[in-house]
Image (spheres, rainbow, N blue to C red):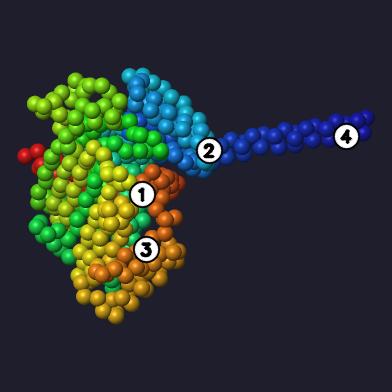
Amino acid sequence: MGIARYQATFRFSINSLLISIFISMILISCNQTEKEPEYLATLMTADPGHFHAALVQKRMYKQVNPDVYVYAPDGPDVQDHLNRTESFNTREDEPTVWQIHSYKGKDFFDRLLSEKPGNVLVLAGNNQKKTEYIHRAVSNGINGFSDKPMAINSQDFELLKDAFKLAEENNVLLYDIMTERFEITSLLQKELVNTPSVFGQMEEGSTENPAVVKESVHHFFKYVAGDEIKRPAWFFDVKQEGDGIVDVTTHLVDLVQWACYPEKILDYRKDIKLASASRWPTLLNASEFNRVTQLNEFPEYLEKDLNKDSILEVYCNGEIIYKLIDVFARVKVEWKYRAPEGAGDTHFSLMRGSLANLEIRQGPDENFKPELYVLPHNPDTDWEKALEEWITELKNQYPGLALVPIPQGFRVDIPDKYRIGHEGHFGQVTEKFLEYLQERKLPDWEVPNMIAKYYTTTAAFELAKK
């Protein structure tokens, strides 16, 4: 009996131990599931009417769930987006593996908020309701990752300010996609502006001769991911897309802030003083409109913008002259129907210092590639030595950089491996956003400077209308 009792007790102890181990493993597994989600981000894309929405998914990210959720009204915009993302999945070179789950219906945004299958909202499309979508998303604890512009008028600006406040209260991030910060010539120009031994001190300039000039030329007809772009008709309605002065100009205003006052917290109420603003149209005939939209006639909502010759007037061009703290700047954006053969969208940038001017040019002489020029006022041995020291130091970060003498100064020779192009910059911006998402925090200067940026563009729009 003693042996039998001992054996029974032993079996009971072993079984109890195994049960305890099993329960502990379940509890550990549950705790790990709660504390360590498999992915940092799951993307939800709302009403993707602009091809920029797809470019966020042109590559994969290890921190991002391959399952992506698309909510949109049914129609050609969402179908074009789905086709483009599918083309990334089926390409031969480094295909993506996105699994797209889509819902199409008029109640798409309410459905997105009620189901909330992800934690990051991607917005790139019709701008008429974009600020409203941003506000509703952050109110519901969803991070916002938005293409520019996040506001296209002064009413949107006020709503956007409140959205940033709500984002902070709900511990979520709201960030706009500033691809131009990753363009190599802009990066190097910023480095030089903040190298006093080469650039000197930033000139103040004036309204007639600003110290900073940034100009951008864009085209309605272009190729994206190797295919002719198809633009939605609403893109040509400034009530839905926004004037040029509040759209592409956003990038230029951002670059001025970012290069002239890096990581400085700006206060839009005292640091920005508008001097002048103007807007003017680009003209499109029916044939050109058909080529870029694949529509045979102008929709009813564009009839208000047709002149007496039935030519569409699109107010996509704008210029702002303003003072940012103690520097006068001029930013200008223009749209044309189509670029010359071999060319594309172009960028020009001038920054004037006490020792040298810095220019980014992208014209025929540069084969339409952006190039950075360093143009000294009075070059001497000490100045050239400082420039050589700058390029030597930068070679640690960008191997292969070199200086090429030209009659007026120097051109910075940039290897092609650093010229990844506009489409590639979307992946770089997304990686930066994911870093911030991991840290649960943006740099202290980002939010006030986004607010300053959108104040500049929307206040300039109101001024231009006068």
CA gap, disc 2 and disc 1:
36 Å
Report helix, strand or loop for mark 4. Answer: helix
What residue is shown with label 3?
A: 413
Report helix, strand or loop for mark 2. Answer: loop
Specify few, some or many for label 1: CA neighbours under 10 Å numbering under 14, 14-19, or 20 or more.
Answer: some
Report helix, strand or loop for mark 3. Answer: strand
Label 3 or label 4, whichever lies nearer to me, is 3
Mark nearer the N terminus (1 vs 3):
3
Q: Residue at x 24, y 46 (%)?
A: 217
Specify few, some or many for label 4: CA neighbours under 10 Å numbering under 14, 14-19, or 20 or more.
Answer: few
Label 2 or label 1, whichever lies nearer to me, is 2
Mark nearer the N terminus (3 vs 4):
4
Among all residues in the image, which is located at the extreme front?
Answer: 341
Foreground of the two, 219 or 354: 219
Q: Quadrant of the N terminus?
A: top right
What residue is shown with label 4?
A: 6
Q: Which residue is drawn at 15% across and 63% down?
A: 204
x, y percent for residue 261? 25, 59
User: Is there a contact, CB below 8 Å, between mark 1 and mark 4?
Assistant: no
Q: Given the image, on which type of amino acid does mark 3 rest?
A: Asp
What residue is shown with label 2?
A: 92
Label 4 or label 2, whichever lies nearer to me, is 2
Q: Residue 13: name its quadrant.
A: top right
What residue is shown with label 1?
A: 442
